[in-house]
Amino acid sequence: MMRLSRSDRARRSVSWVMTSLTALCTIVAVGILFVILAYIAMRGISALNFGFLVDTPRPVGEGGGIGNAIVGSGLLLLLSCVVGIPIGIACGIYLSEFGGGWFVSAVRFLIDTLTGIPSIVTGVFVYAVIVLRMKHFSAFAGGIALALIMIPIVARTTEEMIKLVPQSLREGALALGAPQWRVTLGVVLPAAASGIVTGAMLAIARVSGETAPLLFTAFGSRFYPRNLNEPIASLTVQIYNYAISPYDEWHAQAWAATLVLMALILSINLIVRFLTRQKFN
Amino acid sequence: MSDWRKRLSPTGNFGDAIFRLAMLGAALLVVAIVVVMIVALASHSTLSIKQFGFSFLTSREWDPVKGQFGALAFIYGTIVSSLIALLISVPLSLGIAIFLVEQAPRLIARPITFLVELLAAIPSVVYGLWGIFVLAPFLRVHVEPRLARVFGWTPLFQGPITGIGLLTGGVILAIMVTPIISAVVRDVLAAVPNTQREAALALGATKWETTLVVLVNGAPGIAGAVILGLGRAIGETMAVTMVIGNRPEISASLFQPSYTLASVIANEFTEATADIYLSSLIELGLILFAVTFVVNAIARLMVWRVTRGTAGA
């Protein structure tokens, strides 16, 4: 009896220690998140003011701002959405509504691997195919690089969301005599709309933080963009260039630009969480 | 009605045929992108492949001035920094996933899941900025001297302590892949049937022993999650570039600066004026593409085997 209960106690203590360790792991991860966010808020706020948000970069010691980078990032995101979202949604429709043959499986597999391709490789690819051919860096090239990253994300979420639409809805519409294209576009897609929108928003949040694919496609610029056929500034590339520079003033500006970028990304994530709150309860 | 129209759309509706063609077009476009990507990377690296052949993979010399290019130093830096990242992040991610699936009450689990996933939403360049100005000084002052004192007799922890190098690169990668691995492990654990837990508990197993049973059940999926994290670590660019030191050297010490496949591309691509230099960099991109393609394919297959039939695979 004695021996049994002692081993029982040992087993219970092991269980207690290990389960506490898993809680500790979680605390560490969440702690790191808060430390990073706190640093961004603290260091970012000190260099942030209205002039910084509208001015263009200037030499060290003269201040300057990230106005052109904000506009540039906005244009790049717009370009990538115009190209990436329709193609992504169309792919998602194809994957979910056109049966499950080997070709559909193959496309799904390729889309999944496309998600895993490092974004720097996407940059190299766009450089080789577009920049080398046009012989100069451009906003177009940058937007397409970002679109290539968006397409697989949008496609897979669209597929998942469309699959959640009840089959009876399709059958009902078909029974009323609607052709398949009207069923898909007029009934299925609207029913899945909120899910597709959140998927697209997550894709936007993801690419708005991308730097590597822009380094040698959109490149960067010190001026407000005038047309999409020339190099264009972006928040992320600006942060990178300032962060690796040797100047304290530029470091401070990198933190402030990061605060702006994180405000955008965090608000998208919070909105998505709010939108999906009821659905997965 | 013509034959092709009937084949495209069983209903024989003209709108259906066009719709089907358009959606098929988008899918074919994705296939084409992958194919063109492989062809473009391969064709732009032919110059370097012809000149250096297989020795590109085994030579550690990277000298743009002399026109000598070998990838070994980058392959080494990529492998070692990724391994450090996995060494830290795998136990951490397992702990998080176990806590969220097996222990935490739903009310706590949902917001914490969101917070852990937010770690994945932070851009790479932001991790890099934080790495340069917060993590690297912290490791230099508090962690690396202690490691040198305790483990200094091994070649791993010798040499000058700068805070910039393989170890810092590995640690920042660990933070970045943790949300990815833990998210997949969470799906895998959630897919383990509850009967397994009930059976273990009914036999008198403790909470932790029950968890071990669940872990064994999900083992292939967990392995897949780890490999998926590896794929991400191998391809991560900006954060690593900013803290790893960017020197094409192979040194046993984790304190020393190093270089990865992804970071040398990011760092030197726009400087590459000679054709052979550019071609060598694109060949590095081709290697990176091939490696991540294979790693991801293996990982997806393993995760899919465990989670198929359940949502959120």
Image (cartoon, coloured by chain):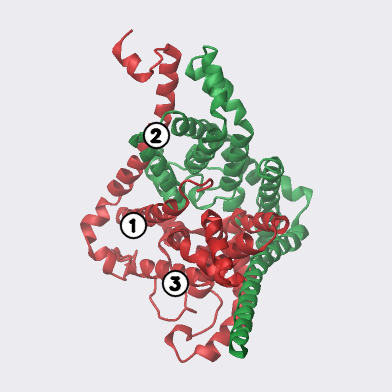
Chain colours: A green, B red
* Of pointers 3 and 1, the one earlier in the residue sequence: 3
Q: Name the subunit of mark 3.
A: B
Residue corresponding to mark 2: A100
Instruction: Identify which residue, A231 or A8, lies in the foreground.
Output: A8
Which SS class for mark 3? loop
Q: Name the residue under label 1.
A: B287
Question: Which image quarter holds the N terminus of chain B?
Answer: top left
Neighbor class of circle 3 (other Cα within 10 Å; few <14, some 14-19, many 20+) is many
Mark 1 crowd level (few <14, some 14–19, many ≥20, 10 Å Cα):
some
Instruction: Report the amino acid beneath label 3.
Output: Ser
B154 sits left or right of A3 in the view: left
Report the chain holding disc 1. B
Q: Which of A245 and A205 is in front in this view?
A: A205
A276 relative to B133, above or below: above
Please report the residue visible at 31 percent of the width from the left and 70 percent of the height from the top.
B61
Viewer-proximal residue among B161 and B178: B178
Numbered tag placed on residue B258 in the rendering: 3
Measure how far apart labels 3 and 1 are at the Cα level: 18 Å
Q: What residue type is labelled 1?
A: Ile
Label 2 Cα crowd, 10 Å radius (few <14 / some 14-19 / many 20+): few
